[in-house]
Image: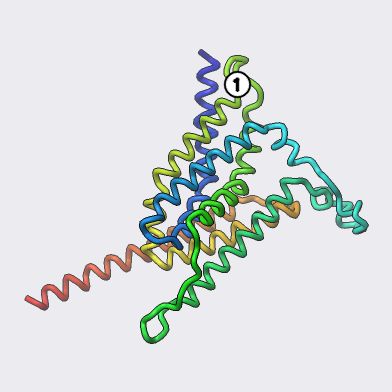
Amino acid sequence: MDAWIEALIALVTLTSLEIVLGIDNIVFIAIVSGRLPEAERPKARQLGLLAALVMRILLLMTISWVMKATFPIFSWTDLGIQSEYLLEHEELNHVSIKDLILLGGGLFLIWKSVGEIHEKLEHEPHGDGEDLPKKKVTFWGVILQIMMLDIIFSLDSVITAVGMVKGSIGGVIPGIYVMIAAVIAAVGVMITFANPISNFVERHPTLKMLALSFLILIGVMLVAEGTGAHFDKGYVYFAMAFALIVEMLNLRMKSVAKGKKQAIEESAGH
């Protein structure tokens, strides 16, 4: 019985971790799926998350590789780059597979987010009220982007999960089963809320711009982690949450002002 209680606690903890770390993924899905025709968006979000689920489970099934991904594969000093600073900071000198994945993923996220912001600004109505033609995206192209970024976003959470649940729980329940159950539960929650969140972001252009800014910030964080820099993410997430609260207050204020204006116009009409 103690083993089952321990497994339940581990399941709730890991599921919560996966959901919190999956917020970044939902924001990215909301942005990239918004480029598709409206009828295809829900299907793309669901298929993207299901494909991401498969990728996460495959990562968990290759635990030995995931843990080796944190081991250095080369050092900058071995390549002839001599620097006292690198010698004093081994985390910057040594480069692992995880570092390369985070670095590449961060640069991709920054490039994608900046491109989306540029596209949004360039394709605003120009005098005649018509938008310039936007670049076309394909359904499976969006799915591929969601899968690629999910690997980046989930790598840290998978490594953390492996570190938290090693071997068997209570000598009875294999830890891998608990980790897979947590991933399935988290992705289930993400699928449930992906459409409402994405639709809400699409209806509010300023919120979409804020979401893109968040993705740039997350991309910078990934690049920093890929180069060996370590900092408290809590400060960054707090700043993002504060900005989101302020934006929600602005949206609420606009809604109240619009309601009052409509009420005045209706009373004037009578």
Name the outermost residue toward the top: 1
Q: Is residue 55 left or right of residue 47?
A: right
Question: Which of 67 and 36 lies nearest the eye of the viewer?
Answer: 36
Q: Secondary structure at mark 1?
A: strand
Q: Is residue 102 left or right of residue 257?
A: right
Rendered location of residue 60, percent (x, y): 62, 33
The x and y percentages for residue 191 are 43, 44
User: Residue at (49%, 48%) from the top-left corner?
Assistant: 48
Side of 99 relative to 114 (left or right): right
Taking the view exactly as shown, the residue that stands out farthest to the left is 270
Q: Residue at x 26, y 70 (%)?
A: 258
Q: Is residue 168 positioned above or below 126 on the image?
A: above
Residue drawn at 41 percent across, 67 percent down: 205
- What colour scheme was applied to this rendering of the protein? rainbow
Residue 32 pos. (x, y %)? 49, 59
Residue closest to the eye, 225 or 119: 119
In this figure, which residue is indicated by the disc labeled 1? 174
How packed mark 1 is, by other alpha carbons closer than 10 Å (few <14, some 14-19, many 20 or more), is some
Q: Quadrant of the C terminus?
A: bottom left
Number of numbered discs on residues: 1
Residue 53 location, x and y as percent?
A: 53, 39
Disc 1 residue type (three-letter):
Pro
Query: In percent of the image, x 53 and y 54: which residue is there?
Result: 238
